[in-house]
């Protein structure tokens, strides 16, 4: 049980970083994303995301309180069930944010391919940067949520296999048996994959992690190669 406490509390800050990432995405969409790129008024998408985030944050805080007072297997069984529910809600929120960002990317791509006058080059650059950065954060959340069954249940399922091979997990002197990746580690994986269009120092192991990395690289390539390039062309 002590191992459960240590594992679940080591990256307690990660949950706040994940919430902050969603709030940041919602703020960028509200302030900078072109209203024509999303369904309904500009505020609808951020409102949907925050509506899902608030109960998820409350459920996570409640479960973290239970972790502090857990003393026996019955308590840990209850925590495991609640954390599985939290992981499902987190994945749902990630899917919603990804769908909204994909819709914006499709709308921008369609406008450019149709040859319409559309927005100015400056606004296209802002939209492209917004979509690209949101894409990085979205896949950070994906990687963080799927690796070893996600942070909500990591440490409660000893049989969970890693989806990513980090350098710290490789034997040779620098490996740390007690080390586990945190939210910022997955952000680095997502950022480098979005810029290099391929893995760098961290390798995907499972099929789902490989497919997610391929999808992220495709969206990043489309955003940089089509949207940003066209926007720079308009500026010239």
Image: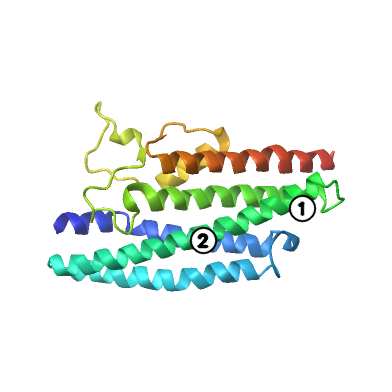
The picture quadrant where one finds residue 8 is bottom left
Occupied quadrant, residue 161 = top left
Give residue 102's position: percent from left, percent from top: 62, 53
Q: Is 31 placed left or right of 65 in the picture?
A: right
Q: Mark 2 Cα within 10 Å, few/some/many (few <14, many 20+)? A: many
**Mark positioned earlier in the residue sequence (1 or 2):** 2
Report, in whole angstroms, how far the alpha carbon at label 1 lies from the one at label 2. 23 Å
Which residue is located at x 43 percent, y 73 percent?
55
Q: Position of residue 95 (x, y in %)?
A: 51, 58
Q: Quadrant of residue 47?
A: bottom right
Which numbered marker is on residue 184? none
Q: Secondary structure at mark 2?
A: helix
Is there any visible trace of residue 183 in the rendered image?
Answer: no
* Residue named by callout 2: 22
Residue 22 location in percent, x, y? 51, 61
* The furthest residue to the left: 72
Side (left or right) of 109 relative to 30: right
| Disc 1, SS | helix
Instruction: Indicate the quadrant containing the N terminus: top left, top right, bottom left or bottom right.
Output: bottom left
From the image, tell me which residue sits under label 1: 123
Q: Is residue 232 visible?
A: yes
Q: Residue furthest top?
A: 172
Q: Residue at x 39, y 73 (%)?
A: 58
- What count of labels does the image hold? 2
Residue lying at 40% horizontally and 53% vertically, measured from the top left:
145
Left or right: 65 as drawn, with respect to 98: left
Label 1 CA crowd tier, 10 Å (few <14, some 14–19, many 20+): some
């Amino acid at each position: 049980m002590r191992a459960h406490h240590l594992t679940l509390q080591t990256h307690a800050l990660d949950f706040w970083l994940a919430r902050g990432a969603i709030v940041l995405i919602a703020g960028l969409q509200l302030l900078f994303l072109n209203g024509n790129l999303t369904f309904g008024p500009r505020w609808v998408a951020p409102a949907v995301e925050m509506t899902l985030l608030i109960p998820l944050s409350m459920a996570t805080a409640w479960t973290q309180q239970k972790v502090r007072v857990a003393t026996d297997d019955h308590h840990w069984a209850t925590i495991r069930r609640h954390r599985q529910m939290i992981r499902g809600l987190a994945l749902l929120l990630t899917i919603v944010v990804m769908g909204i960002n994909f819709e914006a990317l499709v709308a921008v791509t369609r406008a450019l391919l149709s040859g319409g006058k559309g927005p100015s080059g400056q606004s296209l650059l802002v939209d492209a940067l917004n979509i690209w950065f949101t894409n990085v954060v979205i896949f950070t959340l994906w990687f963080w949520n799927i690796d070893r069954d996600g942070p909500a249940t990591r440490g409660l399922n000893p049989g969970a296999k890693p989806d990513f091979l980090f350098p710290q997990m490789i034997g040779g002197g620098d490996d740390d048996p007690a080390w586990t990746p945190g939210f910022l580690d997955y952000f680095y994986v997502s950022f480098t994959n979005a810029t290099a269009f391929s893995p760098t120092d961290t390798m995907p192991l499972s099929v789902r992690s490989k497919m997610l990395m391929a999808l992220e690289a495709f969206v990043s390539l489309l955003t940089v190669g089509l949207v940003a390039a066209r926007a720079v062309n308009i500026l010239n």
